[in-house]
Amino acid sequence: MPARLVIEGGVPLRGSVAVSAAKNAALPALTAGLLTVEPLVFTNVPDLQDVRTMIRLLETLGAAVDRAGARVRVRVERVTSEVAPYELVSTMRASVLVLGPLVARHGTARVALPGGCAIGVRPIDQHLKGLTRLGAEITIENGYVVARASRLKGARIATDLVTVTGTENLMMAAALAEGTTVIENAAREPEVVDLADVLNAMGARIHGAGTVRIEIEGVADLGGTTHTIVPDRIEAGTVIVAGAITGGDVTVTGLVPDHVSAVLAKLEECGVALEVGPGRVRVCGPERPRPADVTTSPFPGFPTDMQAQLMTLLGLADGQSRVTETIFENRFMHAAELVRMGASIETEGSTAIIRGVPFYQGAPVMASDLRASAALVLAGLAARGRTEVSRVYHLDRGYERLEAKLAALGARIERRA
């Protein structure tokens, strides 16, 4: 029987907890190993299903990967296969990140069209348009993206929309291209900046990461480096909301407060008391949150990956709130499960109207994706009675030992088969 989380709600969380490193920074950093014959060493790498999948994919392509706890060493002396197979890529959309490095160094890449969470189509057309601008020949053959290029050449790339993995893929490809590449309308997320830091430490010449315009001067080859992965801002936001929704007193450490500034601002609007210091945030939950309206947007706006968690908090607010999702379609699937727990939520298209209720009731619920699973755990922590969250393999893709961290704060939560 698949694992599930059993939660006895109603306990205010108290204490201190440190966040893990960011999955969405670790994945592109690991793929950067395809760009060099020298070893890359990463510390603070989270032990997550998606990270394990990426390591298996890199090994399929010829990487030698050694892991000792949170330390991972990647070396690709020779690319032995240019094929990223469907059975791995279909489970994790971020697998597409091997496309740019493979074609840049190896000259050929065959990557299965990606999968991942069921929260929308999430096409990779911006990746492919950008690689075409860099001189790659792109075809779709039997469900695989095939890219070929004798040597990529620098170009100006203006993406039609902001894409994090697209920016990362093109940045890695351009690092070994001949000449200068400029990416306009680039993603500004901290994970993009973290990857640029990795690449620059390897000898790349990247300027402007964290802004809408990134300039990359291509180099002939890249070397090895050692790098510590940036903290996970979404895990940090999730645990902060856990403290707030339970009326607790929780200090979250090991984070970068600027990375969660939009989340903190919205929580303060909801009446949550916050104390922010270097590398830490203390949260004290209100007796009942105030309602608020929120619209997701690319960084530095309110992150789509925190939308479900905030909706769960707003479900207990004293009044009506509105959530508008602008990044992904089909990202309100958690709403129906929250309704099973007593929430009053109506969705229409990209908008959800939430009318706060006095309390949630424990119930059996089912996770549909990574962030939805976190939202249901939060609801269970605040609910009266027992909640059972099934399909928690979604949670394991992006949160490292979340139930253990919550239990250390006093939550009555356990994993059962």
Image (cartoon, grey):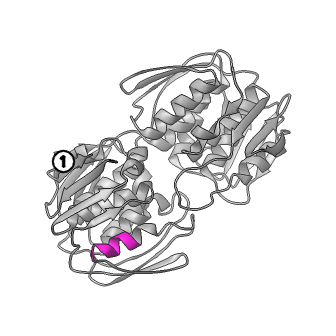
SS under mark 1: helix
Q: Toward the viewer: 241 or 225?
A: 241
Q: Toward the viewer: 235 or 338?
A: 338
Q: Which residues are magenta?
A: 336-342
- The kind of residue tagged 1 is Ala
Badge 1: few (under 14), some or many (20 or more) residues near its Cα, within 10 Å? few
Give the left or right position of residue 352, taking residue 358 as reference.
right
Indicate yes or no whether the magenta region holds residue 337: yes
Up-down relation of residue 149 to residue 14 (above or below): above
Quadrant hosting residue 360: bottom left
Q: What x and y, as percent, mark residue 91? A: 54, 45
Q: What x and y, as percent, mark residue 21? A: 40, 39
Residue plotted at (23% across, 58% down)? 243
Indicate yes or no whether the magenta region holds residue 181: no
Magenta region's main secondary structure? helix
Residue plotted at (73% across, 60% down)? 160
Q: What x and y, as percent, mark residue 225? A: 54, 21
Q: Which residue is mark 1?
A: 407
Give the left or right position of residue 37, taking residue 116 as reference.
right
Give the left or right position of residue 135, taking residue 41 as reference.
right
Residue plotted at (14% across, 60% down)? 12
Residue 345 in sight:
yes
